[in-house]
Amino acid sequence: MEKKALNWSELGFSYRKTDFRFSAIHSDGKWSDGELVESEIIPVHEGAPALHYAQQCFEGLKAQTAPDGRVLLFRPDLNSERMKQAAGRLLMPEVPRELFLRGVEEAVRANYAWIPPHGSGASLYIRPMLIGVGENLGLRPARQFEFRVFVSPVGPYYSSNGMAVISLAVSELDRAAPHGTGNYKVGANYAGGLLATREAQAQGANEALFLDAAERRYIDEAGSANIVIAMTGNRFVTPRSDAVLPSVTRRSLMVLAEDRLQLKTETRPIDLRAELQDFEEVAACGTAAVLSPVGRIWFDNAWHSFHDEGRSVGPVMQELYDLLVGIQRGELDDPYGWTHEVSL
Ligand SMILES: Cc1ncc(COP(=O)(O)O)c(C=O)c1O
């Protein structure tokens, strides 16, 4: 099948309408089989709990084309599992693993012409979502739900060439409360973060960095990415926090850091001010951010920079990026069985 005539390597991270999306409806206690639909518009009741009370959750993953033309997903089981957790937290019906994977695969397959070719640096971003729909007024769970999967070809989140060195500004605002919903991928966490991102950008940073809401002391995460830090003594550390999203990318990087780079990995609270002098390289990681080195962080009225004064990518993050992306794109062996081929 022919590919669309797009300038793949020039794509940014934005929505582009593709031909099909997958939709399944839950009502009277059961899921419909689901089907591909053409319209990108969802007709939704004005009282829908997704609109008023943020009864909704979503996921994000990518499909990439391997050198031999296979189309690969990266650990989609973890996205399916994470969506189940979010559904349970918000009193929504679980999307069974079979339905989740079928929805993702059908949406990818039906939009084959939109999957960026190998070597373009672009990928097909996949956005599964679960929303509470139907007539409602009072604060109660919806009686109907839609599971929908749309896709869009995307380029890099932060820049158009390889690994961009970014900067973060510690936010005065909190993203998530200690026993709230910070560890679930639910829309409610993100609306409150928009202002934090805007303020960080006004400070000259790319993104906000959130500290723990209880003490404002420990690193939580960035607006749309987890944080990993290469520290003195061959350590590779990531925050342990009940309020951060369990990032698929971060969990994978921790394995690679330990197995391939022989670093000592630790998942524990990281006290920003007390441990700063031990930071060698800092990075933000996620499906969209991939692994973006953080050159400097703004807090306490000053910039604090890392490797090479924040000018270039450090060796640890470069090596991890090459390994991660190599596996995701099917260029390197995948001893962990992380890639999942979509049959075409
Ligand atoms: C708040 C937040 N943290 C972290 C991540 C990274 O998670 P993942 O690696 O599963 O994409 C995301 C999504 O990309 C996110 O929205």
Image (spheres, helix red, strand yellow):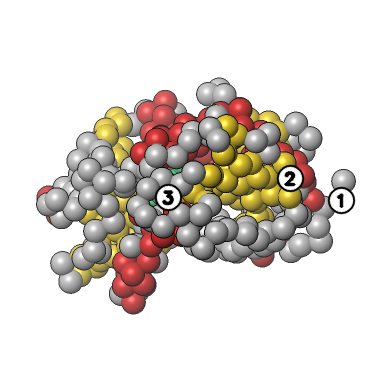
What amino acid type is highlighted by mark number 1? Glu
Task: State which tag comes first along the sequence, 1 or 2.
Answer: 1
In the image, which disc is placed on residue 79?
A: none
User: Residue at point 12% right, 52% down?
Assistant: 215
Instruction: Determine the CA span between mark 3 and mark 2.
Output: 24 Å
In the image: residue 122, left or right of residue 280: right
How far is the residue under mark 1 from the one under mark 3? 39 Å
Q: Which residue is at the front of the view, 30 or 261? A: 30
Tags 1 and 3 touching, CB below 8 Å: no
Quadrant housing residue 22:
top right
Q: Nearer the viewer, mark 3 or mark 2?
A: 3
Residue at image location 76% in from the left, 62% down from the top: 6
Q: Which mark identifies residue 55?
A: 3
Q: Residue at x 49, y 44 (%)?
A: 143
Residue 28: % across, % down? 55, 35
Q: Which residue is mark 2?
A: 36
Callout 2: 10 Å neighbours few (<14), some, many (20+)?
some
Please state which amino acid type lies under the numbered disc 3.
Gln
- Horizontal and vertical percent position of residue 292: 44, 53
Towards the viewer: 217 or 25: 25
Q: Is residue 31 left or right of residue 54?
A: right
Above or below for 26 versus 309: above
For marks 1 and 2, give the CA distance. Answer: 20 Å
Disc number for residue 2: 1
Q: Residues within 10 Å of mark 3 (few under 14, many from 20)?
A: many
